[in-house]
Structures are given as C-alpha cells and as structure tokens.
Amino acid sequence: MARRFGLLYWLGVLLVAAWGLVQLVPILWMISTSLKPLNQIFALPIQWIPRPPQWSNYPQAWNEFPFARYFVNSFIVSASVTVLNVFLAGLAGYSLSKYRYFGQRALFIAILSTLMLPIEVLMVPTFLIAKTFGWLNTYQGLVIPAVADAFGVFLMRQFMLGLPDSLVEAARIDGAGELGTYFRIVVPLIWPAVLTLAIFTWRETWDAFVWPFIIISEDSLRTVPIGLQRFQEQYVTTYNSVMAISTIAMIPLVLLFFFFQRAFIRGIALSGLKE
Amino acid sequence: MVGLRTTPADMPAKARDVGRARPWLRSAEARHQAWGYLFLAPMFLLLVVFKFVPMLQAFYLSLTSYDLLSPPRFVGLRNYATLLQDPLFHQSVGVTAYYVFGTCVLIWFVSLGMALIFNAPLPAKNVLRTIYFIPAIVPVVVYAIIWLFLFHPYGLLNVALHAIGLPAVQWLSDTRAVLPGFILSSLWRFAPYFMIIYLAGLQSIPLEYYEAAAIDGAAGAQAFRCVTLPLLRPTILLVVVVSIILMSKVFTNVLIITGGGPAGATRVLSLFIYQTGFQYFKMGLASAASIFLLFGTMTFTLLQLRLFRDDPRG
C-alpha cells in the first residue's frame, strides 16, 4: 500500500471524483428537467439550472394522480412485510441455529433452495394461488407472498451461529422460557443483523414492482412504483411532470440510504445469496 | 443424538415425567425439539405455499392449455414443442443471453476497478463512495424513466455524442443499438452494487500479505496478480454468479423503456413470460417458458450455493 502523494496521485483522485460526478449527471438532468417549462426541455445548450425554476410542475404532477394514497399504500405494505419477515425469519434462523432436531439440515437446504425461485420465474402460478385465495387487489395479497422470502432466514441463522450456545443455555436454565430467551437474550445480541435485514427488506419491498404490478389493478391499492409507471405511461411526453414525480419518488430511498448507510451497505455486502 | 440438551437443571423434570401421560412431549429433549419445529413452522409454511407449490404448479401448468376461463386441459409436452419451434421464443432466449452476458462481463471488470480505487488511500473516501453508490439506490421505476429520457433522440446521450463529433443514435428504434443502450444503463445501475461486494472481499484480505509481498519485492501490478487476485477468487466467483442471476430476471426497466420492442429486440424471457401469460392468457405456454428460465436460474444458483459451501466464512 504505497502512499504516493505526487502529482499523479492527485490527478488520479481528480479523475475518480470527475467520473463520480459523470455518473450523477443522469439524476441531475432529471431534477433539472423537473423544473423546466415544457418547451425548454430539449433546448440547447442545456440549461442545468432553469431560470426561473418552474416549481409549479411539482404540485401539478402530484395532484394529477392520487400519489398521497400510493405513498400510504407503499408505507403500509413495506412496514407490514418488514415486521413480519424480520420476525418470522428471526424465529426460523433461531430454530435452525440454536436447536437440534430431526431433519434440520434438509429443512435448511429446502429453505435455501427457494432463493432460486424469484417472482419473475413464478409469476403465473403465484398469481393463480393469490387468485384462489381471493387475494387479488388486497393488502394481504401484496404483503403475505412478499413475506415468504428466505434471505432473512439465511442471514439470521448465520449471525446466530456466531453466538455461543452456552449463553442461550444459561438463559434457559434461568427459566427465561423459549420465547423470553429469544427476545431478551438473542435479539439484543444480534441487533445489527436485525437492523440490516429490516433496512434491506424495507428497501426491497418499497421498490418492488413485478408482484404489485401483477396482482393490483385497483387504483386505490397501487404502490408508488406502480403509480409512477402508470403516470409515465399516461404522460409520456410531459417530461417535466414525469421527472417531478420521479424526483419525489426517489426521496424516501435516498433518505433511507443516508440515515442507515452502514446497515444499508452491510445488507448489500451480505446479499450475495439473495440476488 | 448430537447436541442433546440435557442439562442438570432439566433432570428432575425429566425424572418426574416418567410414567405420566404423553411422556414423549414431557421430556426435555422432546420439548426442545418441539420448540425448534414450532419456531421454524410459520416461515416454512409460507415458503411452501408461495415457493414450492408455485414451482410444482408451474410444472403442472406447463403440461396444460389454460386461459383462466375454462379449466386447464392436459396437452402433454405440446407447449414445449411449441416453444422450441417459436421464432419469438428463440429470439427471446437470444436477447436474454446477449443482455445478461453483455452486461455481466462489463460489470465484472468495471466494479472491480471501482472497488480497487476505493480500497486505496483516497481523500474524502466516504463522500466519494456515497456518490458512486447513488445510481444503485434510485428506485427501479425511476431508473427506467431516467434512461428512457436519456435514450430520447434529443436526449443527453445523443447530446454527448454530438459534442464529441459522433452521429446521433436511435437508441429506442434501431434494433442494433437498443441492447447496447440497455447494457450501458444496467452497468450504470449495477456496477456500484457489485463494487460494494468486491470491497467487502478486498477488505477481508489481511494487510500483512501485502507487507510480505512488498518485502519480497512485489508491488503494484505484481502484488495485485500474486496477492489480491488469488485471495479475491471466492468474491470474484460470487460476483460472477450473482450478476448472471440478477440480470437474467430483469423485467421492470425493459417493460417501461421499450415494452420489448423494437421488433422484439429487447423482449427478455421474463417479459416473454409476462406477455404470454397476462396479455395473451396462455398460462400453460407461459409456464413452460418459466420452466426454461427456472432451469437457467437454477443452474447458476446451484453453482453459487456450491461456492458458498467452499467459502470458509459461509
């Protein structure tokens, strides 16, 4: 690891920074376009900071579709999926790491193998099952199939394997009970993993497109990604409105990233098995 | 039995249980096992209902003709025969292969390069890394809309080409240009993601190895070849497999940007399945195509699971 702070080094740093900015240009262009009047969108030379910025594009686009409703729906679905998935995956991971029973290894392999079955592959039969349950156009239809995801089981098991068995046994001997041991001893010790999984699941659910796209046709149940896609379809050439709504839709995930950057990055570093 | 959890504290309870009703459930070991099954059960049932049953159903449906209105009619392997003779399916498989491998090969090198840069001493490293990572946190629909806009005949890509004296490209209507455009967009979005996975791998290489290499006179490119590459091998293999699986199920960006066009030049397999099933209501044929895609995904995931087993950390 030679530290060379010569001219070449600083040139390299400059190049890296410049390339980082080039990568951001598409996003900056989106934000810039969201503030332009329609007749100046493709005007050359490009006006990066529109003068004057047309802020009215935002309320106009927002009021065109029930976006507040879409955000509420996305929030309900993401919160439900995250809570249920972290809770059930945690229990399953606990069972697979701190208990011993017949068929454990086979069950674990069966669970892992479901990671091979993304919704893109199983969209037809999963749709038919949801239809059989009467779950088309319902919240449970959006939530429950999304909870069925084995990544969390794998993640929680890995972290819990790192906890000494003696700790868990000591708690059991102290009469903490099975659930008490889990919630009072195990969960606090693997809290970083719980947070990582929660952030990861929230992000995945908030950004999920394929499944809501297939089972939701009622406007009042659409989530943000579906609403955005519908909006884009309907206002194809009204680029400034589409970009205004896209900018708004980007905000929650950007905030999530900045507030939980470490958990966010850790989730991705660990997500090898997921995608 | 390995890991029998009989502790001294449990002994009296166990002794007490002898001779009572249902002694099996009362023994400490049996209770321990019962709790284990109980904790696993909810998630396992969900996975059975929404993963295993759909998979079996996909197999079954692929042998039927089903339009959602009348009940499924058994047709044997006819759907598979239809697919094998369908030029649209052939095109779709070709498009998927082109898109997947075109993107992945670029991703492997670009994201490794980015990770190497961020593994070196840099001023304001965290800020820079955050900037590099931003394309990966954009919501998927927003990503698609941004690139639809970039591909516009007067969009930023053609403005940039014009600025360096190159002719404009019809990114959305030229069948030869459209996939390279998609590959570029996927590189933009996913390279940062794999940079993070590579960085995790790079940071797990102990610094002493580099110091030892330096003492032996190996620095720069030689240290990279003799220390970094061999020790990064598990990560590289992981990135290869994960990227292929990830790219082989792309759907949203294709649906929004081109809807599969022009002339099917971007109709990847997942879109083929969607259109066959939900637009033409040929659920049987769509399921047969799913089985093909499943087979491809499975091959690579099994490979990946093997890699994980060889990985001492996994």
Image (cartoon, coloured by chain):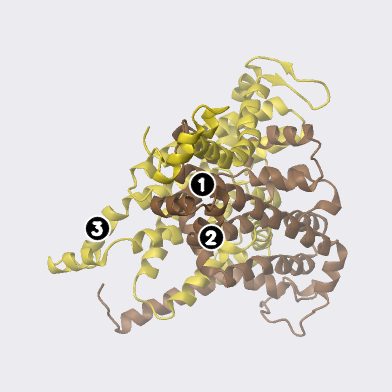
Chain colours: A brown, B yellow
Query: Residue drawn at (43%, 40%), measured in percent from left and top?
Result: B11
Q: Is residue A244 left or right of residue B260?
A: right
Q: Is residue B286 above or below residue B64?
A: below
Q: Which residue corresponds to mark 3?
A: B225
The kind of residue tagged 1 is Gly
* Mark 1 surroundings within 10 Å by alpha-carbon count, few (fewer than 14), some (14 through 19), many (20 or more): many
* Mark 2 surroundings within 10 Å by alpha-carbon count, few (fewer than 14), some (14 through 19), many (20 or more): many
**Where in the figure is residue B169, as x and y percent of width and height?**
61, 58
Q: Secondary structure at mark 3?
A: helix
Name the subunit of mark 3: B
Figure quadrant of the N terminus of chain B: top left
The kind of residue tagged 3 is Arg
**Where in the figure is residue B144, as x and y percent of width and height?**
66, 57
Q: Is residue A129 above or below residue B246?
A: above
Please say whether residue B99 is visible from this viewpoint: no
Q: Secondary structure at mark 2?
A: helix
Q: Is residue A12 left or right of residue A71?
A: left
What's the CA distance linking mark 1 and mark 2?
A: 15 Å
Q: Secondary structure at mark 1?
A: helix
Q: Are marks 1 and 2 in contact (CB under 8 Å)?
A: no
Sequence-wise, the earlier of marks 1 and 2 is 1
Name the subunit of mark 2: A
Q: What mark, if any, has residue B55 been given in the picture?
A: none
Query: Residue drawn at (44%, 61%), measured in percent from left and top?
Result: B195
Q: Which residue corresponds to mark 2?
A: A196
The picture quadrant where one finds residue A61 is bottom right
Query: Residue drawn at (32%, 55%), measured in percent from left and top?
Result: B232
The kind of residue tagged 2 is Thr
Which label sits in the foreground, 1 or 2? Answer: 1
